[in-house]
Amino acid sequence: MCNSPGEAEPLQHHLLHSPGDWDCSSPAMHITQLNRECLLHLFSFLDKNSRKNLAKTCHKLLEVFEDPLLWPLLNFHSPVELKKDNFLLGPALKYLSICWYSERVKVCNIEDWMKNSFQRDFCNRHENTVRDFLLQVCNRCPNLLSLTLSGCGHVTDDSILLLLKSCPKLRTLKLENCVRITDQSLQAVTLHGGALHTLHVDFCRNITQAGLQRVREQCPSVMLRAERSANMIPDSQPDKKLRLERASRKLVQL
């Protein structure tokens, strides 16, 4: 049987000591002598980078790293993490969270018409990264149950539509400050979100009360939350005469 987290310390202590420190009366056990179940259990305590580094040491540990059973849950905290080769996407993935709030990516939530050329280039790189990653999720993770996207300024309606079509078991969809999401995503929920129980669209400034009402009427069983969203100012580019007024209204909201 596999050791519990509290029982793993003696094994780690034994493996980390040099051979000269070992008690000859107690023969050493190499980590690769553990069975697959125990190795999966040990890997489950490691973060993504540690799992990848351990997998580089031998073929047996690489096989454990590549076991889909190790990857039912994934959390990401920056766009850079989506490009790392330290995780596995597969049918075992049930819970996915992509949340970032750093100062570097706040520019991604600025209206497109207000960005300078440098900001647009910066955002285009993030947009490609997010789009390609979510496409992989659609292709490889049909059993996804919960998806949280927070602060992801480049998530589009097209991506949400494809996710709802590709992951028919999705029960929870939480979108926070995904500024490019519009009523098209809400319509996709009514058409393809048959398994949804929870929908959050907080601080998504380009959805409307009409879109929210449509979800309430057509999907009465869905627990819908939309904090501030339909009350925020949308991104449609105003006439020059209205730009100063719009900026003032946003400052008042903050």
Image: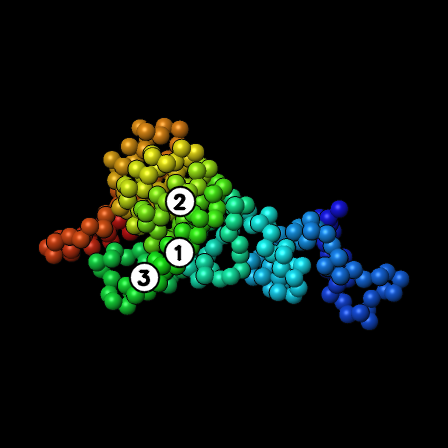
Q: Amino acid at mark 3?
A: Asn
User: Which mark, by number, is residue 240?
Assistant: none
Q: Residue most toward the right? A: 25
User: Label 2: few (<14), some or many (≥20) within 10 Å?
Assistant: many
Q: Is residue 108 above or below residue 205?
A: below
Q: How far apart are the alpha carbons under marks 2 and 1?
A: 12 Å
Mark 2 vs 1, N-terminal side: 1
How many residues crowd mark 3 within 10 Å: few (<14), some (14–19), many (20+)?
some
The residue singled out by tag 3 in the image is 124
Does residue 193 appear to the left or right of 182 in the view shown? Answer: right
Q: Amino acid at mark 1?
A: Asp
Report the amino acid beneath label 2: Leu
Circle 2 is placed at which residue position? 163
Q: Find numbered disc 3 in the image and state the secondary structure of the residue it sits on.
A: helix
- The answer to whether marks 3 and 2 mark residues whose Cβ atoms lie closer than 8 Å is no
Give me the disc on residue 132.
1
The secondary structure type at the circle numbered 1 is helix
What residue is drawn where x is 52% and y is 45%?
A: 91
User: Residue 49 at what x, y percent from top left?
Assistant: 56, 61
Please give the name of the residue rendered at 15% of the width and 52% of the height, measured from the top-left corner: 238
Give me the residue at 78% from left, 60% from top.
29
> Could you say which is closer to the camera, residue 157 or residue 208?
157
Question: Could you tell me residue 193's position as x and y percent?
Answer: 39, 36
